[in-house]
Image (cartoon, rainbow, N blue to C red):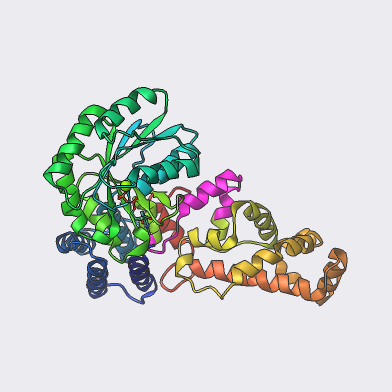
Amino acid sequence: MLNSLSKGLGNLIRKLITGTTIDKVAVEETLRDMETILLQSDVDVNLTGELLANIRKKCLDEKIPPGLTLREHVLKVIYEELIRLLGEKPVGLLGKRKIMLVGLFGSGKTTTAGKLGKYFLKQGLKPVFIGLDYHRPAAADQIMQIGKQIGIPAYVEDNKDPYSTAKNALEKFAKNDVLIFDTAGRNALDIELADELKKLGEIIKPDEVVLVIPADLGKVAKQQSEEFHKLVGITGVIITKMDGTAKAGGALAATSTTGAKVKFIGVGEKIEDLELYDPTRFVSRLLGLGDLQTLLEKAKEVEIKKESVEKIAEGKFTLQDFYEQIEAMGKMGPLSQIANMIPGMGMMKLPEGMLEKQEGKLKSFKIIIQSMTKEEREYPEIINNKRIARIAKGSGRSEADVRELLTQYNQMKKLFKSMGGMKGLQRGALKNISKQFGFKF
Ligand SMILES: Nc1nc2c(ncn2[C@@H]2O[C@H](COP(=O)(O)OP(=O)(O)O)[C@@H](O)[C@H]2O)c(=O)[nH]1
Ligand SMILES: [Mg+2]
């Protein structure tokens, strides 16, 4: 998702982190690169200009906060300004009972209704669909089918009257937790559509009026959301089709500045392809800074000590840690997925398939480490040929297996270490930056 934008910004950040010197000239160059990337992603010219002016002012005119280098400060400012551009805090729809979806033809309303239904169902709620689109033939069938597919009641009426359908549904589903009203679209927001939505709004009295808008509109999304807002009053936005366009950055930036917050993003045609939109995490991933917060939450789920996560992030871990990680990480998910969440990992070029291969061997490694003495686990460098022979015998593995474990361990260690030891960064500096960004350790 958002590939071009992510690649461009990721490269820019990498350049910033690994560059030998960072001075006024380097900052100006970064800003020029950033301008190109944002405009290519169809972010509005004025928005882009504003963003760059803010970054320039904060980086070059204002005093650098104590404890930060210019490099760290620039990173932090870019990160924070991008978050401001793309929306700040996450805002979901939980706790809202009557949700009315509005938007033009083909924007993805009905598909999104289905996705939301599934989302609420997963939260243990009882959602229901109300089909109010009698304008397009077969629209009623579409919502009925989606309902059947995921096991959620869908309600339409044969009389093809959206107003009576809405009225009756309110009575009929008085006990349901969430009512999702799927309205009809038009080719444009004309008087007829505005009138229909207004009337429906008066009947339904929705808690949320969510505009569904496709990402390929790019910066035009701003105008469309403003128009809808003026005529029917929207309380939020869902951007669909984020998976299929280079303009997604533009749509996201445009709608985030209208005051109506982006609540979810649609990232595919399937019913699961819906993500709660969290700008902070979104920007972290965009920049290749990883998603420490998610990583730590996952770690908490399986009760990994936070010191262990810290240790990994800093690249100082022993064979004993390695052993504990194998056990704990097994519960967290694939290594490759975990690695992507560690700040800086996204910037490393990992040997092809290394993490996946590692995964398959972890079991065998565990057995081998069990045959080691405490001293060997803490100071693997003392493991000589004689010890290797003994460990192999004890674990019932070949000497080659033991050597492979040591090689892999050293590779992992080097890899993690290099994240903290990259040019221009002191060990642990990335952790430090993450802290400045508000990720909690
Ligand atoms: N790739 C992709 N396609 C989507 C997404 N959301 C909806 N669509 C497709 O967009 C088309 C129109 O969707 P529909 O829900 O019928 O739009 P509506 O007219 O607003 O109700 C369908 O072909 C959907 O499969 C999305 O997030 N990604
Ligand atoms: Mg529809």
| Residue 340, horizontal then vertical, whole percent | 50, 62
Residue 278 is at least partly visible in this image: no
Q: Is residue 346 left or right of residue 23?
A: right
Span shown in magenta:
286-309
Ligand 1: quadrant of the figure? bottom left
Q: Is residue 48 above or below residue 209?
A: below
| Membership of 232 in magenta stretch | no
Q: Residue at x 75, y 70 (%)?
A: 382
Q: Residue at x 58, y 71 (%)?
A: 414
| Membership of 290 in magenta stretch | yes
Q: Is residue 208 left or right of residue 149?
A: left
| Residue 172, horizontal then vertical, whole percent | 38, 24
* Viewer-closest of 13 and 96: 96
Q: Would you identify the image quadrant in which residue 167 lies? A: top left
Q: Would you identify the image quadrant in which residue 261 lies? A: top left
Q: Would you identify the image quadrant in which residue 101 lies? A: top left
Q: Residue at x 41, y 56 (%)?
A: 269
* Viewer-closest of 337 and 214: 214
Q: Residue at x 48, y 49 (%)?
A: 441
Q: Main secondary structure of the magenta part?
A: helix
| Residue 380, horizontal then vertical, whole percent | 71, 67
Quadrant, the N terminus: bottom left
* Viewer-closest of 41 and 323: 41
